[in-house]
Amino acid sequence: MKSHTQAGKKGPDVRSDCWIGLEIADSGGISVDLQSKVASLYGESIRKLIEQELQFFHIEHAKVAIEDSGALPYTIAARLEAAIKRAMPETLTEFLLPVEDGIRTQTERERFRRSRLYLPGNDPKLAINAGIHNPDGVILDLEDSVSPDEKDAARILVRNALRAVDFYGAERMVRINQLPLGLADLEAVVPQAPNVILIPKVESAAQIYDVQRKIDEVKYNAGVSWDIYLMPIIESAMGAMKALEIAQASPEIVALAIGLEDYTADIGAERTLEGKESLWMRGAVLNAARAAGIQPIDTVFSDVGDEDGLRASVEEAKSLGFEGKGCIHPRQIRVVHEAFAPGEAQLEKAKRIVMAFQEAQAQGSAVVSLGSKMIDPPVVKRALHTIALAERAGLLNDNWMEEADNG
Amino acid sequence: MAEYTTNAAGREVLTEINGEAAVPYKGVGKHRPEGNKAPRPIRTNADYPDSGDKRLPDLKTALKEAGLRDGMTISTHHHFRNGDLVANQIFDAAAELGVKDLRWFPSASFPCHAPLIEHLDSGVIHHIEGSMNGPLGDYASQGKMRGLGVLRSHGGRYQAIQDGEVHIDIAVIAAPTSDPFGNCNGVNGPSVCGGLGFALADSEYAEKVIVVTDNLVPFPCVPWQIQGNNVDYVVEMDKIGEPAKIVSGTTNITKSPDRLLIAELTAEFVRAAGILKEGFSFQAGAGGTALAFAIFLKEMMKESSIRARFVRGGSTRYLVEMLEEGLTDYILDGQTFDLDGVRSMRDNPRHIHTNPFVSYNYHNKGNIASMIDAVVLGATEVDVNFNANVVTHSDGRLLHGIGGWQNCLFSKCTILPIPSFRDRIPVIVDEVTTLCGPGELIDVIVTERGIAINPLRQDLIDATKGSGLPIKTIHELKAEVDRICGGPPAKPRFEDTPIAAIKWVDGTVIDVVKQLATP
């Protein structure tokens, strides 16, 4: 057992986080030295939380120093737990605060995944307000945004965030680490009902089998039954070659995503704005996803200041057949949604098809026709999708059909 | 022992402030004082040089000539904001002259005035009456100031001088350009600040007026924002301000995605409520969120080809762009926040220099504040009755001034775009720590988690119904904030000792700030 450990962050630029220094002793009871900008508002409640958590971990004698920069309770609890587990690595129990009401929204396979906002897993500041920007999904990232020596702390924080933070209906995704480290991430996060697990740098169906087996095992042990979908990320030459077998490796896979930083390095090319070097790979992944009946999702656009560039990039992705784009800044979300929204002509056509379809259904006819043209079922499905997309983008309201009828 | 009474807002307020009787707040528009404004002594030109040259060698000499003595009231303006180099020198000189117990009556103080704590400690300054930003507010909060701080709005300050509540013995007006006669302005010179409107009342009503400049020009100094006919002495100095801290080269909109969202929602609200129409008017300050609001609004105006009749500054480059692009006929400007604002005020006849008399003073025959269609303001706290606080933080510390905030509440639609909490500090609370603005004047709260409309404004509720905007009740917003922050916050603990009084625009006392309890 280490007698001195610490976790979290402090300093003038830190916000919504805290630093905790822990010194476990043999005698002397518990002492808490709290420095906090919210001491007069929540000092008592912070002390109570610390004492409750120490008691939970059967620690009777310890000095706890806290430098708090406005951390919410779930963050304080996570930082203390990280410090405790760094002192006592054999501890397996988890200190879990109650799950906030209404935050565990369910999702569906077919749901829109136009935008997914990356949130560094070890930085609570960005997660708290992520949902208000209305992304289709938020990704609590345990992989690239977390340094190797903070993986343990990030895992606890992400686990707690899944119980505490309201993402206002955004799909709750977690990007785990590459295997085998990612399997340990699953033990922490799967019992907290994430909607989608993102698996980085997938190169074979076997990796998906490992992940799926682990998820099933954790779900079984925890006695939970919710759906947890998978989104493998293809980021290498080998991954691109195996895209189809990966896409088909589990029925829980809902989308294939792309990561281009690693891919371009892997094939020995420079990443350019034009993206000629990755065009084949994007096409290959897209095609595999479509062949497997799942969503193809494009990479991120990393220049957060370039709104026009982002719009062009999304329009290009859309023209290739992609259905989603990664976001690294909340201000990108609206642009992505606007760019994925159907154009006017596309929408008008879809409306006519859907109305013809409704009419055929009302008449009990299996044949949908528009004027003299027969409409095939996949086209109807596509049109329904376009209408849903337009509704989601705020271009249509729920009763557009009545409005259309009324002329 | 201080005597308290309960005012119309239900707050316990003092009946006496620094030895003078005080009127408790009676409600909006309820206090109707009678009588005459403060008298001003008759002067004669025989006492002033025919040459028009009123120069004296230095500030100390001028203060001596002005008859500086114990217990006097010294006023300054805050157009130099955190770049002011003059106020500290006044009290350094007073200390050298052995003068004690002065009342400093600035239009606002800033962190650059922290060195005055020494003069408060030593007894040169007795107390400060004026907005206290930062270290001086903190000093007062700890109960270290001998007298009671009095916080007034910009309009309230004019009112207090005009109504004779505050008599200024010596006004020191730092002026970026002056002539030897004392005509001066803020639009020229190395220390430009735009206007000098906050010093207008001081120049009119003070017993003695000293103009201090680092850019003396031969008569006439034009425009004469302050008239030399009100000035007693002119002092030249090497440097009266730090230009970079007076006006920023550029004012920046916020980069915070959450604040941008709030600003965008605010602009969308203004449009949905039908306020955004040809010939409308608005006021937004220089805070990052307010600037972002102005930019979103500007885009909407362009989209719909709507032109404003006037916008109220604090002017910034963003308002200047609106003026230059023909999106507004006029800027009415009380203070200028960046160099584009200064340039425009100097060169563009449609960029009008205003002062608290025309914009804000409540004891007038009407003023501009109530004619504005929408105003966007900040707050440190708002409570479930829409009462708001701008001077203390939720922990009870006095850290900000009122500025023009109270005066602006009279706009036709007062909107506070504010985060629902800052880190873990709830902004929407049960009851504000300090009452600065009564809820009946605050119409809309726009937060990142939704918009709350004051139930008194059924017209706004109706107008925005079906707009798709995230409209909630203030109680819903508060419940959400409490859930996120881990329950309602504890109330700050205070000693019994009052440290500052908050005046309403009509000079009545709306609330009192008390000394923080020692932890």
Image (cartoon, rainbow, N blue to C red):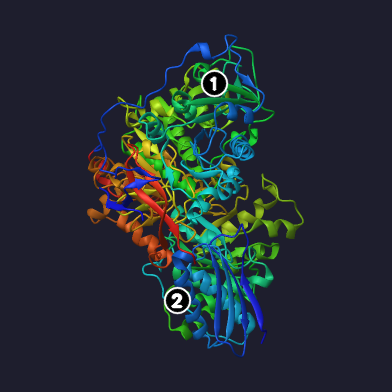
Quadrant position of residue B431 = bottom left
Amino acid type indicated by mark 1: Asp
- Chain letter belonging to callout 1: B
Query: Which kind of residue does numbered mark 2 sit on?
Result: Leu
Q: Nearer the viewer, residue A211 or B60?
A: B60
**Pointer 2: what residue?**
A97
Hey, which quadrant is residue B279 in on the image? top left
Residue B397 at x, y percent in the picture: 47, 55
Foreground disc of the pair 2, 1: 1
Who's the residue at 31% across and 38% down the image?
Answer: B273
Q: Mark 1 points at which residue?
A: B232
Q: In the picture, which quadrant includes the C terminus of chain A?
A: top left
User: Is residue B275 found left or right of A128 in the rendered image?
Assistant: left
Residue located 58% across and 49% down the image:
B122
Report the side of B133 relative to B95 (left or right): left
Q: Is residue A291 visible?
A: no
> How far is the residue under mark 2 from the one under mark 1?
70 Å
